[in-house]
C-alpha cells in the first residue's frame, strides 16, 4: 500500500478512498454479524442476512435486470449470471485490480 503524505481523505486518489470505505464497511458489517450471533443466536443472524440480501435484491438487482433488458423468463441462475457479467463489464471509478500484477484492469463494454 502506498503511503500518502496527508491523512485528509479528500486528498487521496479516488481508488484509495473507495477501497478504504469498502474495507471499513466490511469490518463493521462483520462486527455487527458477530455481535448479533453472540447476543441473539444463529436464527436471528440468518434472518438478518436474508433481510439485507432481500432488500438489496429488490432495490438494485430487479431494477438492473429491467434496465439491462434481461428476460425474467430464463432460469434465475442464468439471469443472475448475465446480470453480473454485464454489471462487472461496466467502467467503474474503483476498477478491479489484477491479483498477479497489481495493475488496474478496464473491462470492455458489452
Image (cartoon, rainbow, N blue to C red):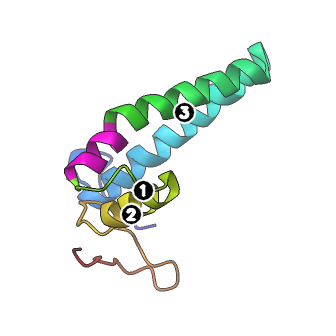
Residue 55 point in image, percent of width and height: 43, 28
> Does 54 lie within the magenta span?
no
Instruction: Identify the residue at horizontal 60%, vertical 23% (top origin).
Output: 48
Q: Quadrant of the C terminus?
A: bottom left
Q: Are marks 3 and 1 in contact (CB under 8 Å)?
A: no
Residue 21 point in image, percent of width and height: 39, 44
Specify which label sits upstream in the sequence, 1 or 2: 1
Residue 43 point in image, percent of width and height: 75, 21
Q: Nearer the viewer, mark 3 or mark 1?
A: 1
Q: Quadrant of residue 107?
A: bottom left
Instruction: Identify the residue at horizontal 68%, vertical 27% (top origin).
Output: 46
Above/below status of 93 relative to 44: below
Q: Which residue is mark 2?
A: 82
Q: Which residue is mark 1?
A: 74
The residue sitting at the front extreme is 73
Specify which label sits upstream in the sequence, 2 or 3: 3
Amino acid at each position: 500500500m502506498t503511503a500518502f503524505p496527508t491523512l485528509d481523505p479528500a486528498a487521496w486518489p479516488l481508488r484509495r478512498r473507495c477501497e478504504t470505505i469498502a474495507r471499513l464497511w466490511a469490518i463493521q458489517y462483520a462486527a455487527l454479524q458477530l455481535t448479533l450471533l453472540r447476543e441473539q443466536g444463529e436464527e436471528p443472524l440468518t434472518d438478518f442476512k436474508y433481510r439485507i440480501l432481500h432488500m438489496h435484491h429488490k432495490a438494485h438487482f430487479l431494477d438492473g435486470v429491467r434496465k439491462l433488458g434481461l428476460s425474467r423468463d430464463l432460469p434465475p441462475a442464468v439471469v443472475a449470471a448475465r446480470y453480473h457479467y454485464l454489471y462487472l463489464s461496466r467502467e467503474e471509478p474503483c476498477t478491479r485490480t489484477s491479483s498477479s500484477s497489481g495493475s488496474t484492469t478496464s473491462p470492455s463494454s458489452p
